[in-house]
Amino acid sequence: MSKTVITIGLRQAAVYLMQCLIPIVVVAAIDNSAECCGALLSALPGQVSFSNTTAYDDRVSTIWSVTAALHPWCFVLPYDTNDTSIVVKILVAHQCPFGIRGGGHAPFADSNSIHGGVTVDFGYMNTTTYDEDSKSASITPGASWQSVYETLQPHGVTVAGARDGGVGTAGFITGGGSSFYSTSHGWACDNIRNFEVVLGNGTVINANVDANKVLWQALKGGSGNLGLVTRFDVYTIEFPNASNPNIWGGSAQYDLSAAEDVIASYVDFAEKSYLDENSSTSLFWIYSHPTRSLTLQVAMDNTLNIPYPPAFDRYLSTPGLINTSISSAPMPEITAQNDAGQPAGRQNIWATTTFGNDPRVIAYAAERHEALIANTLASQVTNDSGLTSLFSAFPLTQAMIAHGTANGGNAMNLEEKSGGVNGVVFGASLAIDGEDNAALAYPLMKQWVDEVDAYATSLGVNWNWQFLNYAHGAFQEPIANYATDMIRAASLKYDPDQVFQRLRRTGFKIPAVSQ
């Protein structure tokens, strides 16, 4: 088996560079697929899937986005933490490039699987357990939020997780995680009591407020840069009525001519969100190419199951209201319905930015969505493209940010970036069929986000912060806007050989230090 030639001084140079806080990124020079996958198969028989097999094809097909469904040398599926430690040791020993797949819901290429390497697939580690004594749930990284909610509901509890049930737990939490409970409990990562982590040398440790606190904080937003998280111990949230564990929520649709008033209602809601931390909202402009329609919708939810709380009075009295679809229902029912609106098996493009709670930027983003996507792109794609695009806006408030500090600190860096004011997380997302159609969509989606960014900057309200869970891997770098120094310091301490910078190929990396 051929080996890469390494010069005598590389190790010394690596140590020097790490001391200077410069991450090392080494691209594999050879194809050692047989060596890497063979070693994994010998150690974990029955847990490695190769191309041209049904098991391999099944793993590719269960990746949510076709855009992200890349074909690795092999998939390795650990059953537990010990298996995961074995996997890491083998990957390092043979210098195997690898990717990490949790729930497989990230939308861009190289987000959860790779070409030219091994995909560590947590599909077998998909359990949730509840401990009544500690009032916490233990969730493994391959679980979906739908399975988490369904497991916890009989106990009369839930957790701060995704609004769409099909989203995976691991990437969602380590990227931050916005939920129905964001205003009342903070980001999903702010609700983690303990991380069980396999480090780059295969060691298994726990990170919490009492042990490895620096790692615990950095994992709350640090994504896959620090290790493989094999268990999340999450504080649970009790439903007000355990025998009726429902939340109240749904959506309202408005005539497009009502956009100015709806935006004003949204801005007002966000500024007053501290008055009702159990109610939440989002704005949506949705373009459907099959029906050639553009619609304006508002999501409204209350986690205490209070129908029509006063927080939504202004929305519901806004002229132009067409209809509402709002009810009291179990959370798993609502998250399953939300997930049905994001079917798998399509080409997907997501991107994001964040700005102050300014109605002018929201209106501009809606205008550019209509011009670039509903008009320009719609005129270019094929009739069977199934193009659907979404402009979403959700409040990022000081009430929400405060939970990060109160719960021990995180790596989101919002205390600095927000400047003490409320903001808007802008999400641009698109689903389409066909690679040619996706290629037409990509530059227009990027243009849309770039123009919104530039406009927010021109008004002095751009936060220059990108929410990692919504960011695009090709042209956005959210870790650069998070608490980069905190994440880098944790990386150098807990991954001194920089395994998750050199060998990991998926997700967002810690940016190099400018010289």
Image (cartoon, helix red, strand yellow):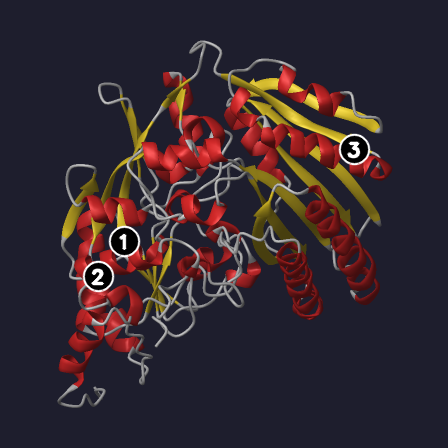
Label 2: state its secondary structure. helix
Viewer-nearest residue: 267 or 365: 267
Viewer-nearest residue: 34 or 106: 106
Residue 6 found in image quarter? bottom left
Viewer-nearest residue: 9 or 18: 18
Residue 430 versus residue 510 in the image, above or below: above
Give the residue pinned by disc 3: 261
Q: Position of residue 197 (x, y in %)?
A: 22, 49
Q: Are marks 1 and 2 in contact (CB under 8 Å)?
A: yes
**Residue at 27% across / 41% down in the picture?**
231
Of label 3 and label 1, which has the lower sequence position?
1
Q: Position of residue 423 (x, y in %)?
A: 56, 42
User: The disc labelled 1 sits on which kind of residue?
Assistant: Leu
Label 3: state its secondary structure. helix
Q: Position of residue 411 (x, y in %)?
A: 35, 48
Left or right placement of residue 219 versus residue 257 in this view = left
Q: Is residue 80 visible?
A: no
User: The disc labelled 2 sits on which kind of residue?
Assistant: Val
**Residue at 24% across / 71% down in the picture?**
38
Residue 409 found in image quarter? top left
User: Which mark is drawn over residue 88?
Assistant: 2
Q: Is residue 192 visible?
A: yes
Of badges 3 and 2, nearer the viewer stands 3
- Number of residues whose C-alpha sits closer than 10 Å to that of mark 1, classed few (under 14), some (14–19) or many (20 or more): many
**Residue at 31% across / 80% down in the picture?**
28
Left or right placement of residue 440 versus residue 159 in this view = right
Left or right placement of residue 267 versus residue 68 in this view = right
Give the residue pinned by disc 1: 228
